[in-house]
Amino acid sequence: MVLPQVFNEKSIDFQGLTFELVGLDQNRTSLFNKELKLLIGGIDVFNEIHVFLADTSSYVAMEAWIENLKVLQALHADIIVPSHGSIEKSLDNQAINATMAYLRTAIQASEESKTSKDFVAKLETAYPGYANKGV
């Protein structure tokens, strides 16, 4: 049996490439390679699909998510591999922009909705072409 070990490093080497661990929250990290300007998005990065909000439904949690996305956006990656997404959608900073916009819409929908059904309906109306409905 191999037990997992705590990883305390700030970067990881993979096949000769160094990736920095980036993000504001150690539980929501992404990987960034400066030379390739490549961001492998962690759990926070979607690309024009409905965002999974079941475990991040409060205003405070969504605002913290947006702040983490701002840190990732400031890296100015040329290529972004979202952790959740579609190959037909954006693989650049538009993925981060779209996720931030979605979260802002979700915050507003949350404030205006009396039930979870209302909340989901508002998001599906705001993003009718997005895949991943019902999450």
Image: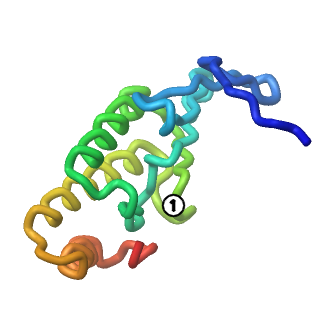
- Picture quarter with the N terminus: top right
Q: Residue at x 50, y 37 (%)?
A: 27
Q: Is residue 3 left or right of residue 58?
A: right
> Which sits in the foreground, 67 or 75?
67
> Which sits in the foreground, 128 or 88?
128
Q: Residue at x 22, y 61 (%)?
A: 106
Q: How is the rendered protein coloured? A: rainbow
Residue bearing mark 1: 85
Position of residue 87 measured from the top left corner of the image (x, y, whole percent): 57, 62
Q: Is residue 91 left or right of residue 108?
A: right
Q: Residue at x 24, y 81 (%)?
A: 117
- Picture quarter with the C terminus: bottom left
Q: Residue at x 15, y 66 (%)?
A: 109
Q: Residues within 10 Å of mark 1 (few under 14, many from 20)?
A: many
Position of residue 20 measured from the top left corner of the image (x, y, whole percent): 59, 23
Q: State which quadrant residue 35 falls in.
A: top right
Number of numbered discs overlaid on the protein picture:
1
Q: Is residue 1 left or right of residue 26?
A: right
Badge 1 element:
strand
Residue type at the position of mark 1: Gly
Residue 103 appears in the picture as rendered: yes
> Which sits in the foreground, 11 or 91?
11
Position of residue 102 measured from the top left corner of the image (x, y, whole percent): 28, 58
Residue 76 appears in the picture as rendered: no
115 to 64, vertically: above or below? below
